[in-house]
Image (cartoon, helix red, strand yellow):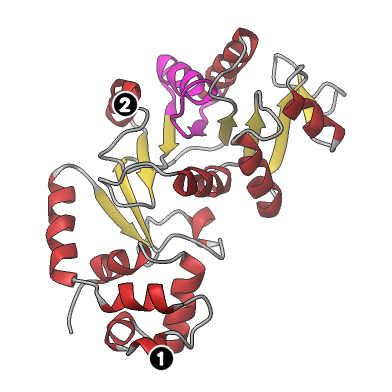
Amino acid sequence: MTASPEYIALSLCHHMGGKTFRALLDHFGDVPAILAAPADELQQVRGIGAKIAAEIGAVDVADVARRMGSWQENGVRIVTWADDDYPPALAQMADAPPVLFVRGQLPSRRPAMAIVGTREPHFVSIERARNCGYRVARMGGVVISGLARGIDTAAHRQALTEGGQTVAVLGSGVLNIYPPENVAIATAMIERGGGLLCEVAPDAMTSPAALVARNRLITALADVVIVVETGTSGGAMHAVRFARNQGRTLYTFKHWAEGNKALIADGVRPLDENLQMLDGAC
């Protein structure tokens, strides 16, 4: 079988994570051998059960190639982990996505700061998120977030207002913007030098699992992660967990939200309104 690595990887990455995909490559040597393997042999690889083995056996490469062509016609760029422009910070991850789908540009500036938090913030936190977006843009950095309602949207929007680069990592497809009311801001991000990226199919709907998983990409792309406001069970706490595992620098703000209190009690250092640490350190 002959096929480009882009759509072969694409045809498999919907069925498993990057770590399992690597295990398959280590076992079989290349993607055509994976596709040709019988189900019982596929299941010898750690992480491959009967369901995933059946899905691999049912891969229709021609259909994947057709879909890929349609996505590219709609402005989607397909970046595999074998490509030179695959972000180095993601390539270092054990569970790096085999394929990224990109509209616009990947992050190209430093510092890169992830600004995350609740979808239902207090107005004080909205102002803090805007201030973060303003300051990052003014220092020539890039704002990275998830385009969600609330904190994410405020940070993205302010970065755009200041002429900065801002990039969103989606839990839906880059051709299926979620939430839908953020289509206009997503378009502005692309037009002004930023972009959108995801690891799911460009036309995929959002899902709870994808929303959680995208946090590891948000934090991996960033040098610093700022949690503006969160509850103890908020989605931003997933970003905190990923950031710690990746060795990223974490900050938050003093706030009455229980998540912020818990983070500070656990050693996350608080920022003041100028984004300086409250203990006076730099």
Q: Callout 1: 10 Å neighbours few (<14), some, many (20+)?
A: few
Residue 267 placement, left or right of 95: right
**Residue 243 in magenta?**
no
Front residue of this view, candidates 118 and 106: 118
Residue 40: quarter of image = bottom left
Label 1, on which residue?
41
Residue 245 placement, left or right of 36: right
Residue 163: quarter of image = top left
Q: Residue at x 63, y 33 (%)?
A: 234
- Residue 90 position, x and y percent, is 50, 56
Query: Which amino acid lies under the numbered mark 2 shown in the image of this protein?
Result: Pro
| Res 180 label | 2
- Residue 211 position, x and y percent, is 48, 42
Front residue of this view, candidates 57 and 101: 57
Measured in 3D between alpha carbons, the distance from the residue under mark 2 to the one under mark 1, in whole angstroms, is 43 Å
Q: Residue at x 51, y 48 (%)?
A: 217
Please give the range of residues in magenta: 139-165
